[in-house]
């Protein structure tokens, strides 16, 4: 059986409240919080980026999985904020966890679903015995254009999953993807901030792909919403996943554990993976999880995961909750400084 | 671009705290030493990886920063006594200045240290944060 | 039995932000003054030793041995540049001393010079960090004030030294500087001003830190035979000592003392057959006020940890039992890094000749200079007498 052998997460310590961002732009913070179901988001420090987040998550995953890093045969990092456009994040992670040199590596981009695409690739390499363990990471320090709706949600964080056949804590029974060419959200080369199609990002984009992928995987596995203990969906805000869950026939309780966005924001490539990690932190042997990611452009990767007893024996000590509990609040000016929104302000000579 | 090869050679040290130890006298070194100051030619040096755990030995808060570090100020620079013995110099991050005290336990994190302008390489390396309970 | 060595001439420029003065102008001024003072002709000089920390990084100029010989009108003469960070001047003097003791030379000039104001402060900070460990200290964002602040913090933790005691050093430095016509800061500061000055690297504040300075100094050394012939009042070198220690602060055995100073002091006292209590006054390396406290402990003027108290009790003032830095020290008179070691010697010679004007220490017979490189990687100590 191919599945998750271990996982690790990372969230920066800094937070900014939605009402603080709203204060700067003269909008009503509490109204935004109510409509998007988000109160605050994570902010990376000036010396953090997708590479540092990926490394911290990967180190935690290696620790939890108890795997010898030298046996990791592939590393894929999915993000839309890799610090280098050319020079992969994956090789820096490989050096930082001492997995070099016998491995393959590459970076992925597919908006917010690059991390789940990395999991699928690792599954293939492990299933075919080309590698023993694969490391899939989804991490981002996403940028929201100042004053834009996305600025309230675009946050930073990441999660890493080690895929293998031995010591599996969550067997991946199936994966099914639904992919189309849909221009709902994009960023051109050299541009600092992404653009999006406003209301076009709802029904034709997020909902169409999530619902199609979820229905597709349940159908071909002859399963219904009530067969699952947990649901994990991509979380661009708090409202979308709740609406999608309802449409599919899932209850709030099934989604509840994985819904982190109200307090950490949308970690883009980390979003679905962090939701899955939070679920595994709690899930017991026999529990079934439906995971559906979403990446603009557009596509959804769905997974059916069956938790094993091993997960109860080897609980992750560095839970998502622990990272969420450590917080230092900052104001908008510090936020702008940390996120490189001020011209010429960066950690560089 | 100056110093690319220097940084690359130091990646095992800067990412993973790989130092050395002398098997003759048992002393451990970080940064790595290739000649044991005590045993000299009688020493037997081999690689040793440090755990990244330690405690604060001394600290300062820097207000006048060298070029490139300006936007971090004020930042905490500390001398950390690693669990295995040696002292090293590093920034302490993710805490308020008043939280730092001699003797407090710290653990390593992976952070950006400095980039070479906006088109040069990014140099990553270890920093430390206060150990969470 | 090699002959004794004496200083027979001294020269020094004004210290400060000297926009109109170039590196070449500064060293030739100081050198000319020294040679005039010695009453010798240029063609009597056998060699030049120039201490300069980093003209390459400050101004792009290396090969200053050739440059200085050339611009002194002495092209052709043997010339050597000596570098040991802020101890370059002291070390240049030692190399000059060794050349005379070897018998190969009879009269040499040892000069020190630094032009630091041609680049902005943030760039100067980086150049000065060349005196520390590039790969393990500079890379991490350390500055020199930070390294000394780390030592200050340990000294305060281990011995209970207070910020007030450290600040008293700066008050004294400034007071002495008001009596020194060449000093950079000829004004007094109060204890309160020092303690409230802007923080640089806590606990050190702006007024605990020596400034960025341009300046040069030079001395003429001669063997005993030549000295007795040329000079009425030669000042004899009783001891010359140097010791090194690890370049990086984190590799030291203790952060609250400088082993290089302690070792060099021991060698110097042994050479001169003297004890700390025989020293009448000293010019020590107060690049940061804490360094003066650590220096007087290393030199044995008080027990380890009691440097703060000795200062607080006023014993290191001009009228105290062991005046320290009558010139104003690096804090009051300025710190053109390569020149400092020689400037300290100039002050000691002036005191021993009785020429120190308002700063004169009564009955001074034996003086000591203490010059540090970096955060303690090098220490050069000389002892002089007029006996």
Image: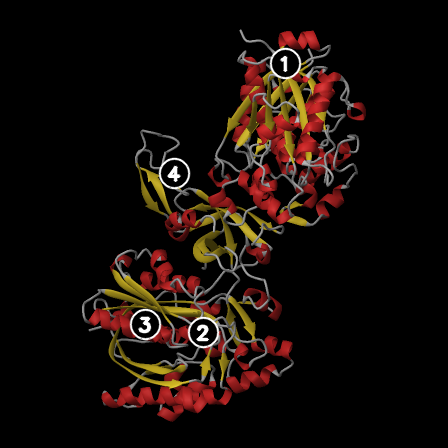
Kindly report the distance in space between the C-alpha atoms of the residues bearing marks 2 and 1: 74 Å
Is residue B131 visible in the rendered image? The answer is: no
Image mark for residue A267: 2
Would you say the residues marked 1 and 3 are in contact, meaning their CB atoms lie under 8 Å apart? no
Kindly report the distance in space between the C-alpha atoms of the residues bearing marks 2 and 3: 16 Å
Instruction: Tell me whether marks 2 and 3 sit on the same chain.
Output: yes
User: The disc numbered 1 marks a residue on which chain?
Assistant: C
Q: Secondary structure at mark 2?
A: loop
Q: Residues within 10 Å of mark 4 (few under 14, many from 20)?
A: some
A303 sits to left or right of B54: left
User: The disc numbered 2 marks a residue on which chain?
Assistant: A
User: The disc numbered 4 marks a residue on which chain?
Assistant: B
- Residue that label 3 marks: A118
Pinpoint residue B92: horizontal percent, then vertical percent.
51, 54
Q: Nearer the viewer, mark 2 or mark 3?
A: 3
B74 sits to left or right of A248: right
Image mark for residue B67: none
- Residue that label 4 marks: B33
Pinpoint residue C281: horizontal percent, then vertical percent.
69, 23
């Amino acid at each position: 059986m191919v599945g998750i052998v271990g996982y690790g997460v990372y969230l920066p310590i800094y937070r900014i409240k939605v009402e603080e961002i709203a204060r700067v732009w003269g909008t009503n913070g509490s109204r935004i919080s109510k409509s998007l179901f988000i109160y605050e988001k994570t902010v990376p420090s000036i010396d953090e980026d997708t590479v540092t987040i990926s490394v911290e998550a990967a180190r935690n995953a290696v620790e939890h999985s108890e795997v010898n890093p030298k046996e990791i045969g592939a590393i894929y990092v999915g993000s839309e904020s890799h610090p280098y456009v050319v020079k992969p994040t994956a090789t820096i992670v490989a050096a930082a966890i001492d997995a070099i040199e016998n491995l393959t590596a590459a970076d992925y981009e597919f908006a917010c679903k690059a991390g789940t695409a990395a999991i699928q690739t690792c599954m293939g390499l492990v299933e075919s015995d080309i590698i023993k363990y694969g490391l899939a990471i989804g991490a981002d320090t996403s940028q929201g254009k100042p004053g834009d709706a996305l600025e309230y949600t675009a946050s930073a964080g990441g999660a890493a999953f080690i895929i293998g056949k031995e010591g599996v804590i969550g067997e991946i029974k199936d994966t099914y993807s639904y992919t189309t060419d849909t221009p709902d959200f994009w960023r051109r080369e050299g541009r600092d901030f992404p653009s999006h199609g406003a209301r076009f990002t709802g029904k034709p984009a997020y909902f169409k792909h999530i619902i199609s992928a979820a229905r597709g995987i349940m159908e071909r596995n002859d399963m219904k919403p009530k067969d699952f203990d947990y649901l994990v969906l991509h979380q661009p805000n708090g409202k979308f996943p709740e609406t999608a869950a309802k449409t599919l026939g899932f209850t709030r309780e099934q989604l509840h554990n994985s819904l982190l966005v109200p307090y950490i924001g949308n970690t883009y490539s980390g979003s679905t993976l962090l939701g899955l990690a939070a679920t595994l932190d709690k899930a017991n042997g026999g529990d079934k999880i439906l995971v559906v990611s979403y990446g603009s452009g557009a596509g959804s990767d769905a997974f059916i995961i069956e938790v094993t007893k091993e997960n109860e024996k080897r609980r992750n000590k560095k839970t998502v909750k622990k990272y969420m509990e450590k917080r230092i609040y900052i104001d908008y000016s510090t936020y702008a400084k940390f996120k490189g929104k001020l011209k010429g302000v960066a950690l560089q000579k | 671009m100056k110093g690319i090869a220097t940084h690359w050679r130091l990646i095992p040290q800067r990412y993973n705290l790989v130092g050395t130890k002398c098997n003759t006298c048992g002393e451990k070194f970080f940064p790595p030493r290739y000649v044991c100051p005590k045993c000299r030619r009688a020493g037997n040096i081999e690689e040793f990886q440090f755990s990244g755990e330690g405690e604060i030995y001394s600290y300062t808060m820097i207000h006048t920063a060298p070029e490139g570090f300006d936007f971090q100020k004020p930042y905490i620079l500390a001398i950390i006594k690693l669990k295995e013995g040696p002292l090293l110099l590093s920034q302490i991050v993710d805490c308020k200045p008043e939280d730092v005290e001699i003797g407090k336990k710290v653990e390593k994190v992976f952070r950006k240290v400095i980039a070479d302008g906006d088109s040069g390489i990014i140099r990553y390396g270890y920093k430390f944060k206060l150990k969470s309970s | 039995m090699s002959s004794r060595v004496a200083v027979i001439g001294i020269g020094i420029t004004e210290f400060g932000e000297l926009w109109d003065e170039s590196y070449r102008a500064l060293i030739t001024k100081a050198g000319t003054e020294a040679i005039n003072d010695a009453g010798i002709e240029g063609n009597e000089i056998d060699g030049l030793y120039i201490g300069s920390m980093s003209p390459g990084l400050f101004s792009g100029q290396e090969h200053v041995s050739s440059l200085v010989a050339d611009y002194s009108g002495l092209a052709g003469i043997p010339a050597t540049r000596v570098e040991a960070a802020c101890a370059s001047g002291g070390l240049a003097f030692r190399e000059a001393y060794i050349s005379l003791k070897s018998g190969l030379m009879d009269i040499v000039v040892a000069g020190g010079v630094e032009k630091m104001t041609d680049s902005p402060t943030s760039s100067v900070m980086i150049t000065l960090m060349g005196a520390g460990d590039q790969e393990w200290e500079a890379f991490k964002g350390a500055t020199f004030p930070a390294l000394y602040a780390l030592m200050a913090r340990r000294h305060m933790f281990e011995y209970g030294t207070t910020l007030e005691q450290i600040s008293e050093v700066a008050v004294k430095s400034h007071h002495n500087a008001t009596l020194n016509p060449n000093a950079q800061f000829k004004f007094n500061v109060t204890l309160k001003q020092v303690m409230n000055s802007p923080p640089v690297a806590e606990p050190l504040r702006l007024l605990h830190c020596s400034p960025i300075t341009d300046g040069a100094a030079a001395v003429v050394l001669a063997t005993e035979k030549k000295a007795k012939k040329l000079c009425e009042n030669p000042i004899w070198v009783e001891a010359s000592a140097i010791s090194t220690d690890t370049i990086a602060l984190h590799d030291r055995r203790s952060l609250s003392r400088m082993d290089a100073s302690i070792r060099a002091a021991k060698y110097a006292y042994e050479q001169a057959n003297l004890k700390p209590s025989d020293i009448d006054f000293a010019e020590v390396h107060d690049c940061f006020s804490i360094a003066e406290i650590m220096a007087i402990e290393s030199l044995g003027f008080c027990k380890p940890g009691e440097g703060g108290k000795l200062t607080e009790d006023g014993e290191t003032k001009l009228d105290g039992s062991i005046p320290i830095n009558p010139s104003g020290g690096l804090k009051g008179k300025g710190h053109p890094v390569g020149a400092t070691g020689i400037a300290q010697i100039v002050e000691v010679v002036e005191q021993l000749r009785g020429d120190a004007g308002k700063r004169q220490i009564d009955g001074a017979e034996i003086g000591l200079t203490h010059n540090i490189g970096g955060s303690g990687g090098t220490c050069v100590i000389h002892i002089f007498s007029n006996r």
